Amino acid sequence: ALPLPMGDDPTAPTVEAIVPGIDFANHSCGAPNARWEVRGVVRGAPDPSDPSGSGPRVELLGEFGATPAPGEEVVISYGDKTNEELLFVHGFADRDNPHDALVLQPPWVIDEFGEGGDLN
């Protein structure tokens, strides 16, 4: 599942979706050599001014300066996710994940605030 934008605003919420074809690309936390974009859509509807005339589509694009060489694996970023999220959602963990975190809850937090340890 990849974060699919819900509008033109880059700060707008996303929805996790399986994107046929793109979901075959593996994940790289450090140096993806490709990315995907939704094209031919404006505010959730087909873009009448789209010069390709192809209608709404998802395109796989090479990253500037990192285009894969012939025979090299195409890798994209699934987002800045911890290994916990990668494992739960995608079924793998990345040994060199810079976004990984380890959350420890000492017993006194659980005793005082309950499971989840909400200190607020």
Image (cartoon, rainbow, N blue to C red):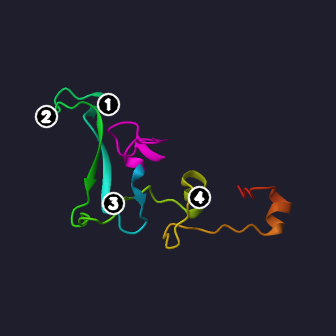
Residue 82 in the image: x percent, y percent? 55, 62
Give how far apart the Cα atoms at labels 3 and 4 are.
20 Å
Residue in view at x 39 percent, y 55 percent: 25
Q: What residue type is labelled 1?
A: Arg
Left/right placement of residue 32 relative to residue 61 reads right
Residue type, numbered disc 4: Leu
Label 2 – label 3 distance at C-alpha:
27 Å
Dividing the picture into quadrants, the one containing residue 48 is top left
On the picture, is 48 further left or further right than 29?
Answer: left
Which label sits in the foreground, 1 or 4?
A: 4
At x 28%, y 65%, the residue is 71
Mark 3 vs 1, N-terminal side:
1
The reply to whether dot 3 and dot 4 touch (C-beta < 8 Å) is: no
Q: Nearer the viewer, mark 1 or mark 2?
A: 2
Q: Are marks 1 and 2 in contact (CB under 8 Å)?
A: no
Measuring from the top left, give residue 45's x and y in whole percent: 31, 26
- CA separation in Å, label 4 and label 2: 40 Å
The numbered mark at residue 74 is 3
Disc number for residue 87: 4
**For the magenta stretch, what is the residue range?**
1-23
Q: Which residue is the site of mark 1?
A: 43
Q: Name the residue under label 2.
A: 51
> Gap in Å between the C-alphas at discs 1 and 4?
33 Å
